[in-house]
Amino acid sequence: MTIPVDLHEALTIEDLRVGIGRGRDRVELLDGISLSLRRGEILALVGESGSGKSMTALAAARLLPPGAELGARRLVVGGADVASAGGAALDRIRGKSFGFVFQEPMTSLNPLLTIGEQIAEPIRLHLHLDRAATRSRVIDLLGAVGFPAASTRLDDYPHQLSGGQRQRAMIAMAIACNPPFLFADEPTTALDVTTQAQVLTLLRSLCRERGMGMLLITHDLGVVSAVADRVAVMYAGRIVETGPAAAVLAAPHHPYADALRRALPRVSAKVARLEALEGQPPSPRAFPTGCRFHPRCARATARCRTSVPALVPSGLRTVACFNPIAETKETAP
Amino acid sequence: MSQYLARRIASFVAMIAVAVIATFIANRFVPGDPVLVMLGDQSSNLDLAARLRADYGLDLPLHEQFVRYVTGLLRGDLGLSFRFPGVPVGEVIADGLRISPVIGLAALVLSLTLGTLLGAIAAVRAGSLVDTGLMFVVVIGLSVPGFVVATGLVWLLSVRLGWLPVAGWGTPQQAILPIIVAAIGPIAYFARLTRTFLLETLGQDYVRTARAKGVPERGVVLHHALRNATVPLLTVAGIMMGGLITGTIVVENIFNIQGLGRIAVTSIAARDYPVTMGIVLLFTLFYGTINLLVDIAYVLVDPRIRLAVS
């Protein structure tokens, strides 16, 4: 099946749904997620734990655990139609049309294989290079991700590397076949702060140099402002606001995005106490009716309890709220 | 690496030494006078008794007996049998040495290959009908004693169908049933554990990483998951050897095969301690060697052990 593909398109997710269980035990984890990215663009997906950020990336990469059911109107990752692919076709897409950087580099690398072997694997599978060419490509990749003395580190095992080096090896593996798109699921959460900044800078420059789109999953708004072009805020399996990262972070329109921003510590502001968002994120087994944020929202009205607000474009942003914070009509086209 | 190996070999030697001391003590301190047993109704013949004692070195002080025992072992001399007066133990068990390793090693190879294969199939198809069916058979294989399985198989394959001989040793046909019976328990055990360990490694993050790279399912299972599952499986394989030894004892008695196990049982019944202890020593040597090989295999499979010890 061929579908029209925009050459600049790196990721298109339309109406992505993920559910588990049947009948009365049915739980909808993702409810109509739509995202799109162009090559070279970085989109940060933010939200609390359990909001469905990682689930969105895993679903788009077709890496959901068995039992989770996926549905989407359109799912194109790195130019490949992922929704309809299965089995061998999917194996040919993964690693070639997109790479995936996972959160925990220690457990996400195979402890019994050298990093050289692990980075060579996608090259061998997708590019069919001979041994020598594969080896030199692995060395180039390790150099590109900032591995000092790359050619001597090929035969190192993951446990011989530092956390930052492991994540660099993981990134080298993910970009080994020069994919047009990269998933990065909290790539710096397991790292110390200085290493975090280095890895983020690396990811950003790799995207720019290679024209690679990246979906960066994080719960750290500081990361968003440092790296992302655009941001999408998730809450309870839905996207509540998208827009240019700087604008959304400076003045969120959705009350949840605003609450997230207020919870961010600032060096400049002299506040004695951080604002915390009251309450707990809802469990997928008991999602509230209407807007899922309404039980925790100060601006909620009767309508929020009964109907689901759609994502409505407002300037460069989209917002799913009946009572957004800023009056946005004047910026609408 | 060499230090690690030296430590392993040292502990292997220590184990053998303990076995030598234990068998010596068992030989000398078991109740009953073996000379009186050998004399039978000539127990009043004191000259003969004295000669036998001298032949067996039983008249020497204990420490000299021990030195004789150890130096004899080093020359491959396991002593003289009680049951067959004057016959060296090595001669009594010579036939067994030609038979039991065949049964044991064939059962070992069968259980490792078939057990791993069945366990891997069950793990990959976890929750399916294939998995449930396989695990049902495995539970039967684990819980039904070997002699019951043997009786059933003999009845079916030998008595009813007449395909295979009922007992004995010498022809390839006669080897089939004993090897199957010896292997059934270990196959089931190994299949069960392979399933468990493989399911665990299949759930690991690095398996998801492999899938994300586009590694086909075959490669994911064999190259990434099974390889990691091999580390705990190796441990179990070493321990399983103990079960295989007792397994051959049962099998040889059921099929009336004059292997080490059968000789061990008849020697115990005849209070032929030198032969019994000789066989115990051989089993210890075999078990120790297998576990030494497992220790070496660890190093080859897992770089974390390799590097930690170098």
Image (cartoon, coloured by chain):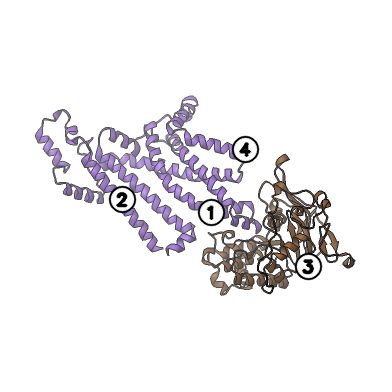
Chain colours: A brown, B purple
The residue that disc 2 covers is B16
Q: Is residue B71 above or below residue A156?
A: above
Q: Secondary structure at mark 4?
A: helix
Please report contact status of discs 2 and 3: CB closer than 8 Å, yes or no.
Answer: no
Q: Earlier in the sequence, mark 4 or mark 1?
A: 4
- Residue A118 appears anywhere in the view: yes
- Residue A5 appears anywhere in the view: no
Give the image location of residue A260, x and y in percent: 72, 63
The residue that disc 1 covers is B227
Can marks 2 and 3 be said to lie on one chain? no
Q: Nearer the viewer, residue B173 or A114?
A: A114
What residue occupies the far left of the structure in this picture? B47
Tell me the quadrant of the picture where the C terminus of chain B can be found. bottom left
The residue that disc 3 covers is A251
Can marks 2 and 1 be said to lie on one chain? yes
Measure how far apart labels 3 and 1 are at the Cα level: 52 Å
Name the residue rendered at 57%, 55% in the picture.
Answer: B224
Q: Nearer the viewer, mark 3 or mark 1?
A: 3
Q: Residues within 10 Å of mark 4 (few under 14, many from 20)?
A: few
The residue that disc 4 covers is B129
Tell me the quadrant of the picture where the N terminus of chain B can be found. bottom left
Q: Nearer the viewer, mark 2 or mark 3?
A: 3
Please report contact status of discs 2 and 1: CB closer than 8 Å, yes or no.
Answer: no
Q: Secondary structure at mark 2?
A: helix
Q: Amino acid at mark 2?
A: Ile
Horizontal side of B72 relative to A247 (left or right) equals: left
